Structures are given as C-alpha cells and as structure tokens.
Image (spheres, rainbow, N blue to C red):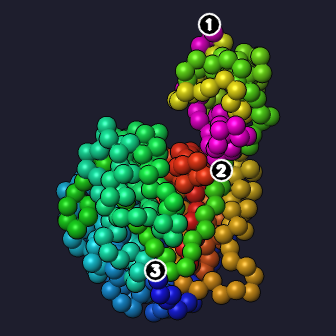
Amino acid sequence: MPKRPPGRLLGLGPRVGPRPTRGWAPPAGSVYSAAVSSTAWAAAAVDETLDPVQALGRASAEVLERLGESPELVIGFVAAAHGASPRQLADWSRGLAGGRRRVIVQVEGLLSQAGEHTATPAVAVLGLTGDVGEGDAVHSFDHARGRECELGDELVEYFGDLTADDLVVVIADAHALDARKLAAGLGSCGPAGLLGLGVEGPEGGGAAHAVDGEAFSAGAVAIRLRPPSEFRCALAPATALYAARTVTRSQDNWILELDGVSALEEFRDAAGTLWDDERRAARSVLVARPARPGGPPDAALVRAVVGVDEARAAIALSEAVEPGERVAFARRDPIAAREAMAAAAERLRPPAGTDPGAGLGLAATCRARGEPLFGHMGIESGYLAHAFEPLPWLGLVGSYQLVAGAHGPNLLTHTSALVRLS
C-alpha cells in the first residue's frame, strides 16, 4: 500500500488538556475542527447548530476545506438528541458534501476538541481520503435481530479477506441487537482490528443509520478502514477492583459462592454503606470477569449485578458463570478512571522526537462516563485530546463497546476504547 506524505496539523483555538473545564460551553452554532494540511488523509468537524441540516452542511463544508480535496468517504454522526427518524437520516445522507460513499449514523453523544455533547443536539462529520476508506468500505445490516451471530461471516464475504492492517468500525443498534451474540459473531473478522459501539436512538429507542440515501433500522453499519501505516489501541476502564475471588458454586448466570462464602454476603461487603440503597449499589458495584479463560479479572470487562436471591444468598449477572472462574467486585471510581485515561494516552502517543504525521483518533466510550463519572464536563474529552493530539479526533458515546482481543471480540462497558490511526 503506498504511503501518503505526513501532514502537519494546525490547532484552532486553545488546546484542551486533561483537566476539568467547569461550566464551559462552546458558543451555539459554531463549527469546531482540527485544521489539517493538504497532505493529511482525515479531517473532522463538529457543529452544534440546532438545525441538523445546517449543522451537517457547515461541518461537511469545513471538512472539504480542510482536506483540500474531495474525500473518498464522508461519515456524519448525529446525536440522538436531534430526534431524527430513519427517513430524515436518509435525506441528510444525500446532502453530505463530497465523498463517493456518504454515511449518516446515530450515536448517543459526541466528544470532540470542542467539548462533550451527550445530552444536547450536535453533529460531527469525518472525511477520509486516499486508500483509507476506498472501495466497498461500507456495509449495512437491516433488521438483523436474531442473526447477530452471522454478521461477522457476512462482513468477511462482503469485504473479502481482512488482515491485521484493517480496522473494522461497527456501530450497532443496542436496542434491537443482542450485544453478546453480536460480539461472538464478529469474531469471524479476525485478524482485523475491531472498534465497536452499541447505541440507542431518540428517547432510548432504536438507532438507525443511512448510506447513500437509503435508511437502515434495527441493524448495524460496518466501516472498514485501512490507514496508510498502522493503528494502535488502548483501553481505559472506569473501575477499581477489589481482591480476586474464585467462583466455587454457580448455576447458569447465578453466582452462589465465592471462595466458599455466599456471593450475596461478599456483594454486601463490597457495597459497604451503599447497601442501604440496593439499586444504587447495583449501579456502583460491578463484577469484573477475565478477558481470557483462566485469566485474572479485567477492569475493562465488568458486568452489572442484575438480580439478588436472598433465599439462596446469590447474585445474578447477565451471562453464565462457570465454577473455577476468577472474578472480582469492582466499583466505579473517577480516580482510577483518570489514571487509566492517562496511561492509555501515553501508550498511544508516538515516541518523543518523532513526527506524528497525518492521522486520526477515534474513541468509543460509555454513556456512564463523562460528567456522570467525573462530576464535571470536559474531563473525558480533555484526556482524549491529550491522547490524540495533534490529530483530528472524535469520541462516540454509546451503551457498550466492542474491541478485538486475543481470544475474540470482548464486550465492554464503563470503558473508553481508543484507537490512534496514522
């Protein structure tokens, strides 16, 4: 694959660092983007104009100007707060400026250099030139409930052989599709990298997307990216783990005993004073599972406690648990989340003294993070800016994340999955 010459990025406005921005909000109706040279292959722009048609038009025009050429692929991301219908998304996709392929995707929220748009209307436009998104790089699934396990095979048939140089970005309707079955089905896409996000649409309903004027509901969209050189991934969980325990008795998705002690008793100990409010305890104290068979609990692989059985002194997760598995209770912790974000940023940044060149940053992040986790807007987006600078980047907000692991795709929650493409 030919290499594109490196581009330099010219920052617009003050850089957002890894720190809170208390009470800050950008002026309404403004466009924000990272300015790039004509040799770069990606540009992104965010617009929060209340009229989504105007917002998409302004943002896509900004991307075209920054790239200096018509992109191969244009992707518009529309926050669920706009309340768009599938038919509207189809109309808007026709109106995107530039691009041989034009895609519009609903997401629950957006993070960018401009800040965090998680409950307010906003749109983002991403433009890609050159080899990155060329060819048949977009595939849609319509009304895919019940065949989630088959979607990976269908992608391989459509895209052809995927390699370790490919990154497959999947955005799925979390309201319609079974996340665990989808994760299992996408295992067929290996050895390609995977960055997935499950999203709900307006008012917690289904999320739609549109490609070249055609709308798709209750399904997913997959986009294959081929960056000129490489991409690097990092995970930033939002939990701190208690000591690991061994499941000594279980039944399907019920954990009865941990190290010979009733699971409910251990859960109460981990919840501490939160136990006075059982619902709050279930939101704040999770169970971490291993990322590989026989491995230690992973802070990024946490599951909520979905049931309590006082008679059996047991707790239930949303999936089966086998005796012998190592698990740990985990609590949502903003300090641990900050440390994980800082570590992820350092893993992604190029070595000191090297030219970062052209590139793109993408993040799939959980709706339970951001202000609900840190207590302030701007902290999450500040860390992402630090991880990706000086590249253009976007953070997409949803209910779960999917990433490729050594033993197949992992279904994550409460986690930010970061990918730096260069």
**Measured from the top left, where is residue 90 in percent x and y?**
21, 62
Element type where label 2 sits in the image: strand
Q: Residue at x 65, y 29 (%)?
A: 281
Q: Is residue 290 something that shows in the picture?
A: yes
Which residue is the extreme one toward the top? 311
Name the residue that disc number 2 marks. 237
The location of residue 174, given as percent across then percent down, is: 40, 44
Q: Nearer the viewer, residue 323 or 28?
A: 323
Looking at marks 3 and 1 on the same chain, the residue that comes earlier in the sequence is marked by: 3
Please give the residue where the numbered disc 1 appears in the rendered image.
311
What mark, if any, has residue 326 been given in the picture? none
Type of amino acid at the residue the image marks with label 3: Ala
Q: CA distance from mark 3 to mark 1?
A: 57 Å
Q: Residue at x 52, y 66 (%)?
A: 164
Task: Decide: is 62 above or below 215.
Answer: below
Circle 3 sits on which residue? 42
Q: Residue at x 35, y 82 (%)?
A: 71
Q: Which residues are magenta?
A: 286-312
Q: Helix, strand, or loop for circle 3? A: strand
Q: Bin the neighbour count of mark 2 within 10 Å (Cα to Cα): few under 14, some 14-19, many 20 and up.
A: many
| Mark 3 vs 2, N-terminal side | 3
Answer above or below: position of 236 versus 346: above
| Residue 48: image location, x then y, percent | 40, 67
